[in-house]
Image (spheres, coloured by chain):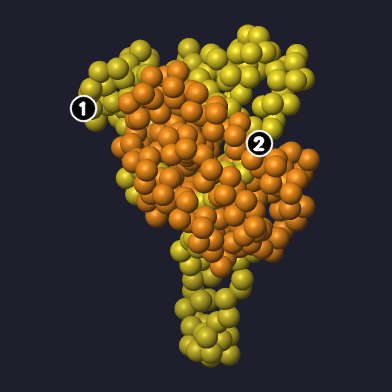
Amino acid sequence: MRCEETKDLAAEIALGIADGEERAEALRHLSTCGECRRVVEQLSGVADELLVLAPVQEPPAGFESRVVDAMGLRKRPRRRLPGWLSPRWLAPRVGPALATAAVTAAVLIAVFNDDRQTADRYRETLATANGQYFLAEPLADASGARSGVAFGYEGTPSWLLLTVDPAHRGDVETGELVTRGGRTIPLRSFALDPRGSWGGTIPVKLSKVASIRLLGERPGEVLQASLR
Amino acid sequence: MSGLATGDADAATAFTRRFQARVYGLVLTIVRDEGTAEDVAQETFVRAWRHAGTYDPRRGRVATWLLTIARNLAIDVIRGKKAEPLDPELVAATLQRASAAGGPADQAAPPDERERVRAAIAELPDEQRRALFLAAYLGRTAQEIGELEGIPLGTAKTRIRTAMLKLRDSLETKNEV
């Protein structure tokens, strides 16, 4: 692509709407042409300035708290116990029951020590990156037969790993998320590797995803995992 | 911004509070659904927080960096939903009205800056203004704008290009005054 063609396309590049092939050619030219790069930079500045015209509107109450929660930064404040739950009030009333429960717990801990270690490891793993939980749900075909597994992680970022059984690998073309609000979000980078797996980050919290759908070329070629 | 990059909760709250009205307003304009707008606005701040270390102040102000993230996420959502086309006149009118009115909570873009941009856009012919809004706010390609407006692709490209060049010249002139 030459200077004249690149400058013709500069506005579309700056606005982020140039089509992939043209854009790639223009970017190759820009990497070697300072004059054209200057024009694109100027127009990118104009595109940025256009955004200041959008209406200003406050989001629903509590928005910033939800954002900080989503970032995993909030330190949860300790709740103060009401007076009737104070140790002084509770000790004589529930002491005997607690003693019995403690003995039972000691027995259970001994029996389920492995489970506790597993839980500890799980918590430590989640704490490494402020994660909330992992999950695994079956991917089912239209008849309900298990056809793969969807593994998910709620954290920053949230991500999915999908595995599809060999019988269905040829059917699946695209993937999408359906949120609990009914919104459909395409998995843009979705493409199964030769072993039938795909993994990637998702643009919403996993807790907001109601289901994961893998679609084929023809209607009915759908694998779906419903998330609890 | 540096507090955001280090993961400070108070800094993140202050940062969000400062820009939330502008981000939410932009996203709502694009996605036209309050629930979706809140999700997208939230994701905008999470992305900003996650990539705060890569923000380069030499390449623009924080507000425009943040609004660009918001715009791109919102456009991804409406493209994913295959939303019905908007009436270009309605988009243009909404934005012009909004920019003229300003807003009490707008701390991210001073009124004089909004007025400067609004005045520059007001000088554009209607058809160029519509093409510009469709491209800048809704991420419509020249091909899509041509189809929406019932004009050839070449005409749509010319409208976008001419509008952007005029705007550049006009804003440069206003900056010099």
Name the residue rendered at 66%, 63% in the picture. Answer: B14
Name the residue rendered at 57%, 65% in the picture. Answer: B105
Please rate how many residues cluster around mark 1, counting C-alpha atoms within 10 Å: few if below 14, some from 14 to 19, many from 20. Answer: few
Counting from the top left corner in percent of width and height, residue A188 is at 47, 27
Counting from the top left corner in percent of width and height, residue B56 is at 76, 40
Badge nearest the viewer, 2 or 1: 2
The vertical placement of B46 against A136, above or below, is below
Residue A209 left/right relative to A199: left
Measure how far apart labels 2 and 1 are at the Cα level.
Answer: 62 Å
Residue B132 left/right relative to A29: left
Please rate how many residues cluster around mark 2, counting C-alpha atoms within 10 Å: few if below 14, some from 14 to 19, many from 20. Answer: some
Q: Determine the image quadrant of residue B70.
A: top right
Q: Is residue A86 visible?
A: yes
User: As shown in the figure, which amino acid type bears the numbered disc 2?
Assistant: Asp
Q: Chain of mark 2?
A: B
The one of B119 and A68 positioned closer to us in this rendering: B119
The vertical placement of B28 against A93, above or below, is above
Name the residue rendered at 53%, 89% in the picture. Answer: A83
Q: Which residue is mark 1?
A: A143
The vertical placement of B140 against A110, above or below, is above
Colour for chain A in the figure? yellow
Q: Which structural element holds mark 1?
A: loop
User: As shown in the figure, which amino acid type bears the numbered disc 1?
Assistant: Ser
Counting from the top left corner in percent of width and height, residue A58 is at 50, 63
The vertical placement of A202 against A141, above or below, is below
Disc number at residue A37?
Answer: none
Do marks 2 and 1 share a subunit?
no
The one of B93 and A172 positioned closer to us in this rendering: B93
Q: Chain of mark 1?
A: A
Q: Which residue is mark 2?
A: B169
Colour orange belongs to chain: B
